[in-house]
Image (cartoon, coloured by chain):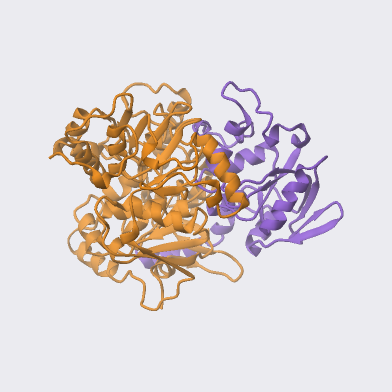
Chain colours: A orange, B purple
Amino acid sequence: MSTLYDKIWERHLVHTEEGKPALIYIDLHLIHEVTSPQAFEGLRLAGRQMRRPERTFATIDHAIPTLHRDRPFKDPIAAQQVATLRENCREFGVKLYDLDRIEQGIIHVFGPEQGLTHPGMTIVCGDSHTSTHGAFGALAFGIGTSEVEHVFATQCLQQTRSKNFRINVEGELPFGVSAKDVILGIINEIGMGGATGHVVEYTGSTIRSLSMEGRMTVCNMSIEGGARAGLIAPDETTFEYLNGRPFAPKGEAWERAVEDWKQLSTDEDAYFDRTHEIDANRLEPFVTWGTSPDMSVKITGSVPEISEAKDRSEADSFERMYEYMGLEPATPIEKIEIDRAFIGSCTNARIEDLRAAAKVAKGYHVRSGVNALVVPGSMQIKNQAEEEGIAQILLDAGFEWRDAGCSMCLAMNDDVLAPGERCASTSNRNFEGRQGRGGRTHLVSPTMAAAAAIAGHFVDVRDWKFKN
Amino acid sequence: MEKFVTFTGKAAPLFRSNIDTDQIIPKQFLTRIERTGYGAFLFNDWRFEQDGTKKTAFVLNDERFSDASILIAGPNFGCGSSREHAAWSLLDHGFKVVIAPSFGDIFYNNGLKNGLLPIRLDEALVSALAERAADGAGIYLTVDLSERSVADESGKIADFEIDDFRRYCLLNGLDDIGLTLQNEDKITAFEAKAGH
């Protein structure tokens, strides 16, 4: 009786030895400009080669501008970092999807979109949101730069086995409640470190009913609950998404692959160290009010009062958060006015997210005084959205329409909040300073962000009057 | 990696929950391609005003802790982003040990791989240590990795757990990649069997 995690783990065991971490094989290694330069340098200093360069794929996403990518970068240090990635990829023979390529995008949008992500794979990247790929039933997790170097040199990682944690979500998602609200709701319940040391498998009818885009949103934020990885067993939805993508198996190989992938599910009665149940009917659109992703409330709620803190330590955190976020306890969420909106990131910048935002925006205009930014997850998505007319709807509604990249999720480029600015953001982290020093981030779904941009404050998207 | 056997140093208290790696090393410093020189940017937004002046209320700007090398932190220290720059910046600033009730998984690994020792201790004990560290002239702690213990000036105060293999690597300053490559034949055999 094994869990899906156990099965993938077993398939990748290269070597085990009593008293040592296991050596596991890594099928796919994704890299970007920020966490790879020191790893390449380490190889060079030790006179080592990459073991399997054809299993590593690179793109550029973190620090790039979302406007005028053809011009020289304003930031010479960021420019040097990108140049370094290009040189490293050339020297070591790694395939790079550079800024002039239609495939370029946020690394965790790019991988699945190109069909690089397959069920049952082990996937790593020097980025904590690698958990996104777990949506395909791949064991995918973020690693540090030392481990990036380790994978370069050995195509393996030394790993200790994580515990199994099942989060079961049952029921039909109410109207206006999205995959983002599912994961914000989960993190709200389990807490920010709630899944530390565990790999989470998401199960249940709600998860099954989600599209691949929605499943990626859920798995993406597994790390925000502290999990090593998130997993969803592959099914017809997964196969349909992958079929025909550039790096998906073709012809007979496809048939064989699907047969194999169908074996990838948790056995009945398999043991989980922990389980947690969520009733989808209870979920509402969530808005974070504090500076950690578990500090969220339902749109119909208010900023919590100090008396609602669990303990003394949480009460201290609340005090810091009120001050940093510029919020008074008991303020109704719908009364919170915003200055900026950001629709983008590896959490919510796929075509379905942009379609949902456009549906809300159609026939409306962004509130005067609010700046709203839409940053597609890849150039391919950008093109698709333009062809579908989504881009025009958003532009007509006063949203800015940019080139693909991580952008204001972590604000390493020019897309930055000014001190004190308040933002409705579809990204994954509301940490202090994450979107710019002194910036105030509220995490929401794409429809909630679009509606807030138009209303100028948070509103319940379930009451939205759609104009068709 | 340098060997880590025993270490004695001054403790600095920063007992807040969920100190994420964005706070430890903010993103504006991640465009550098070096592994060194991040100490100046450690906790940048907490340590400095936008114009670069020191925020006097922040613990690391308190002269009593200018030579601190052991950080006493709250639960879930180092959560969030995988950036190894967080471990590099703590080391470069002079920290060798972080004691907390719990850590983010990726940070914990990154620390071990760089000779920055993360030690998990009971929350009540860590909280008490933080209070003692904040009082008066502060406290000195001694960490003995071979014994897996933490002591103050008057003797042992706690044992801690650490994976045996990780401990062995730290005690001997071993290089992970070198160790893995001792099993290169097994990697080759796996690849052949898996058809890779």
Is residue A88 something one can see in this rendering? no
Q: Extreme left residue here?
A: A468
Please name the residue shown 32% across and 48% down the image. Answer: A111
Q: Extreme right residue here?
A: B154
Is residue B166 something one can see in this rendering? yes
What is the x, y in percent for residue B12? 72, 42
- Pick the residue in front: A98 or B154: B154
- Pick the residue in front: B139 or A31: B139
* B40, above or below A286, in the image: above
What is the x, y in percent for residue A200? 43, 62
For the C terminus of chain A, the image quarter is top left
Left or right of A7? Residue B110 is right
* A400, above or below A166, in the image: above
Please name the residue shown 67% across and 36% down the image. Answer: B93
Residue A121: image quadrant is: bottom left
Please name the residue shown 21% across and 38% down the image. Answer: A358
What is the x, y in percent for residue A76? 46, 23
What is the x, y in percent for residue A75? 44, 23
- Pick the residue in front: A113 or A419: A419
For the N terminus of chain A, the image quarter is bottom left
Left or right of A254? Residue B188 is right
